[in-house]
Amino acid sequence: MTFHGHKPNAGLSPVLSPEIAGFLAENGTLPNEWIDRHGSPLNLIWPGQLAKNLAAMEAVLAERRIAHAVYYGAKVNKSPGLMATALKAGAGIDVSSLYELQDALHLGADGGKLVATGPAKSRAFHEALIDCQALISVDSPEELDDLIARLPDRECVQPVLLRLQPAGHEKSRFGMPAPRLRACLARIAAEKRLRFDGLHFHISGYAWKKRAEALREAAPLIAEARAMGLAPRMIDIGGGLPAQYVDPHAYRAHLQAQRPDDYRTGRVPSAFYPYGGALSAADWLRHLLDAPMGDGLSVADYLKREALTLGLEPGRALADQTALTLFRILRVKALTAGDHVIFVEGSSFSACETWFSSEFLVDPVLLPTGRSARLLRPVRAYIAGHSCLDEDVLCNRWLTFPVAPRAGDILVCANTGGYQMDLLANEFHRHPMPGRLRVVQDSNGQPALVPDSLTRGAHALQHHWPVDRLYAGHDDPCAE
């Protein structure tokens, strides 16, 4: 793919959707104009890609004739446009707070399309979930006690899942080991206001084999629940489906070749997200469904035999290729031995892994501005934010740019929709929160922006952009 820009030669170029690659290749000065108007950093959202990601997952499940319920993990991004797209495409929403629930309901979600996870649900959250009859994943016997105490006296049947803590995950603070879960089953069997819909688990990491192990542990508990007169209908395996940010071969080569002096810190991070894993989300699902369950059955065979729905809560995998984050370069500062630091207008809170002692292993794309002559020799640099903290670093890796970056140029961080852009975003130094806008096509088929907000008024938009310009000629499906 040819860009009107330059990528460092570190070998970890981003994988881009055709739509986003075309945008970078064909729109010249537009990103710079948008940053001039709306500020840096600027988060750009392409919600339609989420529907394509969902369709790819559901195609695998339909191909195997697996009953399924896919819930978009709303915690992955604060974009209401992504949540609205998930609902429109037929997905449910996994909500982990009262506020995510309120946004989902505001966008028209029915309680039957919502599942509530997380171990620390407040009284207000419980009551709102009960009120809309959302499916509640109960994390502990203590939560079950709280939930029962909050059930209304009027006739109602509240659907619940019980969250299993699979063997080998005893250090986790989430879920219940099998003995405690069995005690909760007995409690539910005696409570007519509760309906046991099945089991839930969520395992850290991205290994499908770990999910298959947990499914094998869940199977006898499903049988026990049915022997008690309950009617479970689902096993929800949570999230952890992969997203491929970079080419898998390039990623493996990088991991094998990297050395401490490739990083300005002089050390290689101990762990990375699998940015270039071997499997797509769809292939990951195929491997899981083919995994053995015992008695000669695969996972797919077991789910069909037991008439169980497979629940999933993908976050990154649904937000894959839905976003870019643009940073304007403030200054390029020479260091010793020919090395440089690139200061960007924005913070590492908006697109990095360095706050987690890791690294975002996706090379940025440099979009030069202006036509004047440039230094042609390569420039080696790392990338830092604009705050007063020495830890405010977007990229500790030494990147070699074939064209010298300079003030006013733009760095594009690709595929930041999965936690990157707003997990840690804040107003440190009283800088306003980064803008987040949806990219649409205007009446001439050209890229244009609309606010990605649930609030139409200037209160939510006052920092960077004139409301009348953004709304002119466009509908905002997320507005009140």
Image (spheres, helix red, strand yellow):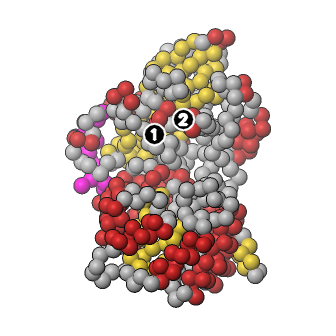
Q: Which residue is mark 2?
A: 355
Please give the residue where the numbered disc 1 appears in the rendered image. 424
- N-terminal label among 1 and 2: 2
Q: Residue at x 37, y 59 (%)?
A: 122
Q: Residue at x 67, y 11 (%)?
A: 337
Give percent across and percent down for residue 60. Answer: 61, 69
What's the magenta region?
464-480
Query: Badge 2: few (under 14), some or many (20 or more) residues near its Cα, within 10 Å?
Result: some
Q: Is residue 341 left or right of residue 10?
A: left
Q: Classify residue 84 by image quadrant.
A: bottom left
Position of residue 299 relative to residue 227, above or below, is: above
Do the residues bearing badges 1 and 2 touch, measured as CB atoms within 8 Å? Answer: yes
Q: Residue at x 44, y 24 (%)?
A: 387
> In the rendering, at what x and y percent does residue 360 appear?
59, 37
Q: For residue 433: magenta?
A: no
**Label 2 is placed on what type of residue?**
Trp
Examine the residues drawn in magenta and state their main secondary structure: loop
Disc 1 and disc 2: Cα gap in Å? Answer: 9 Å
Q: Nearer the viewer, residue 168 or 402?
A: 168
- State yes or no: residue 465 in magenta: yes
Q: Residue at x 65, y 79 (%)?
A: 220
